[in-house]
Image (cartoon, helix red, strand yellow):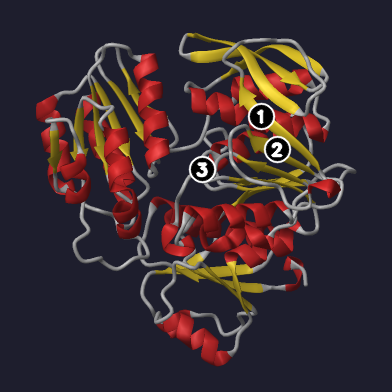
């Protein structure tokens, strides 16, 4: 079965970042694409402008009668009216992950997995491929700032395209993939509503490594405690940032950044492969975590056969991903950064990066917890990371796919915070509060609908 076989495709949950990339792929193939989502967003507005018919009410009459394939996200409740209708009508139905596996199986595939870092890494790989003129298809988990989209495709030329995908651990989705190159950026505890324990989650990551095609490669971040499955059939590399700054090459299967220094807010460094050193690379993004992501992306590019000058050009011109350490305002007396961080380790990495860039400055962070289950499971860890701020402003939990859990609210985090400068504020009152507070450095953090506050905050502080 191939994606090209379907001429009319319907999406349940089309506004999701992964779903919308697939929708754009089917539009590229010339299929008629339509879909449902719960709410209208800037992304669904853009999809509509691209020719996709989208509605926001559960109405089975709005599902095209010629629909041949329905693609759905696990976030769709089983009691959803359209979902139940499609089951009764026995229309072919596939999860987003199954469709991504079907598409990528026809191409050389680079898959990026990890509880954090995968969006920046996969988007950077796609940017390197495009900059180097290599045919590619990329399904991204964020909006590339270089191209303004989460789907990239360039298939001209004699060579088959390289497919870049984010390998999502949620719902074990990544087990649908069979990559040629797999990157694992991290495997911190997360999605315990799915896995129950960290050990079970790690076992799923290990099972994913067994999906690598014979003769392929695994690029594993140093320190991530995963035991590769079936590693005799593929190459295993590690990657890291070398704090000892040794530029000597070795025969080990290790990629690393060495000699890293910050100049004008960005990293200058050398890239060491097992048998070579690429001198004087410049990454156009701040943050140690972004340098780690760049080493992972460069490692994949190296194994793909892309040369130093092509990679160096792409690294320097890479602008990042919307809502990933995303500078909104940069003034001498005020800096505003918006970030998608919704896991304790992501929060820590973001806040520490800001501390390095702006030593001695007061940093205020607004955090919207994402999911009741994640808040319940990691309240202590969230508090430890948020205590790195000078002031913590909490919003109510964004539920996403979940129903409320008794006794679970943002107060769980608030009560565990050590700082005295902490408060829970309603979203509607946040902008007014910040205007009165006038922070030097402001961060908005979270994966929910906190992004809807970015423009109102910008408006207040740009005037």
Q: Judge by depth and name the residue closer to the eye, 433 or 238.
A: 238
Label located before the other in sequence (2 or 1): 2
Which dot, 3 or 2, sits closer to the camera? 2
Q: Residue furthest left?
A: 436
Quadrant of the image occupied by residue 93: bottom right
Q: Which residue is mark 2?
A: 219
The residue lying at 60 percent from left, 56 percent from top is: 203
Mark 2 closeness class: few <14, some 14–19, many ≥20 residues within 10 Å: many
Q: Measured along the vertical axis of the image, is residue 261 above or below residue 328?
A: above
Q: Position of residue 57 (x, y in %)?
A: 36, 74
Label located before the other in sequence (3 or 1): 3
Q: Measured along the vertical axis of the image, is residue 367 above or below residue 81?
A: above
Can residue 49 be seen at all in this image of the molecule?
A: no
Position of the C terminus, as image quadrant, is top left
Q: Measured along the vertical axis of the image, is residue 98 above or below residue 89?
A: above
Q: Give the CA distance from mark 2 to mark 1.
A: 7 Å
Q: Judge by depth and name the residue closer to the eye, 28 or 14.
A: 14
Q: Are marks 2 and 1 in contact (CB under 8 Å)?
A: yes
Q: Which mark is residue 143?
A: 3
The residue lying at 65 percent from left, 32 percent from top is: 296
Q: Which residue is mark 1?
A: 239
Can residue 239 be seen at all in this image of the molecule?
A: yes
Label located before the other in sequence (3 or 2): 3
Quadrant of the image occupied by residue 158: top right
Q: Measured along the vertical axis of the image, is residue 237 above or below residue 194?
A: above
Query: What element does badge 2 sit on?
Result: strand
Q: Give the CA distance from mark 3 to mark 1.
A: 25 Å
Q: Judge by depth and name the residue closer to the eye, 237 or 139.
A: 237
């Amino acid at each position: 079965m191939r994606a090209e076989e379907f001429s009319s495709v319907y999406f349940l949950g089309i506004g999701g970042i992964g779903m919308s990339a697939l929708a754009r792929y089917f539009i590229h193939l010339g299929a008629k694409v339509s879909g449902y989502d719960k709410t209208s967003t800037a992304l669904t507005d853009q999809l509509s402008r691209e020719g996709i018919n989208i509605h926001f009410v559960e109405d089975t009459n709005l599902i095209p009668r010629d629909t041949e394939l329905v693609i759905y996200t696990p976030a769709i409740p089983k009691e959803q009216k359209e979902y139940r209708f499609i089951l009764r009508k026995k229309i072919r139905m596939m999860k987003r992950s199954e469709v991504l596996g079907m598409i990528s199986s026809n191409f050389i595939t680079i898959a990026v997995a990890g509880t954090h870092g995968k969006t920046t890494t996969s988007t950077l790989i796609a940017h390197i491929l495009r900059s180097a003129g290599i045919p590619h298809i990329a399904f991204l988990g964020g909006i590339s700032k270089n191209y303004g989209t989460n789907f990239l495709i360039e298939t001209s030329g004699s060579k088959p395209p390289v497919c870049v995908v984010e390998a999502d651990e949620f719902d074990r989705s990544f087990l649908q993939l069979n990559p040629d190159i797999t990157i694992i950026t991290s495997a911190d505890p997360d999605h315990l509503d799915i896995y129950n324990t960290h050990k079970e989650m790690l076992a799923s990551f290990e099972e994913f490594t067994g999906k690598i095609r014979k003769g392929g490669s695994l690029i594993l971040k140093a320190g991530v405690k995963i035991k590769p499955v079936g590693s005799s059939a593929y190459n295993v590399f590690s990657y890291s940032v070398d704090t000892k700054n040794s530029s000597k090459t070795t025969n080990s299967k290790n990629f690393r950044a060495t000699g890293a220094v910050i100049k004008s807010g960005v990293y200058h460094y050398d890239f060491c492969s097992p048998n070579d050193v690429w001198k004087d690379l410049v990454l156009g993004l701040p943050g140690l975590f972004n340098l780690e992501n760049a080493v992972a992306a460069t490692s994949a590019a190296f194994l793909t056969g892309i040369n130093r000058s092509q990679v160096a050009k792409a690294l320097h011109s890479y602008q990042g991903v919307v809502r990933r350490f995303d500078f909104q305002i940069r003034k001498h007396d005020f800096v505003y950064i918006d970030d998608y961080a919704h896991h304790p380790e992501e929060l820590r990495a973001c806040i520490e990066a800001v501390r390095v860039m702006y030593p001695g400055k007061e940093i205020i962070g607004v955090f919207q917890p994402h999911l009741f289950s994640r808040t319940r499971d990691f309240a202590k860890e969230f508090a430890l990371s948020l205590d790195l701020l000078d002031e913590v402003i909490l919003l109510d939990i964004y539920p996403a796919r979940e129903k409320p859990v008794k006794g679970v609210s943002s107060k769980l985090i608030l009560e565990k915070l050590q700082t005295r400068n902490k408060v829970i504020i309603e979203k509607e009152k946040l902008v007014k509060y910040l205007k009165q507070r006038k922070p030097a450095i402001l961060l908005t953090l979270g994966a929910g609908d906190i992004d809807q506050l970015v423009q109102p905050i910008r408006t207040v502080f740009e005037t």
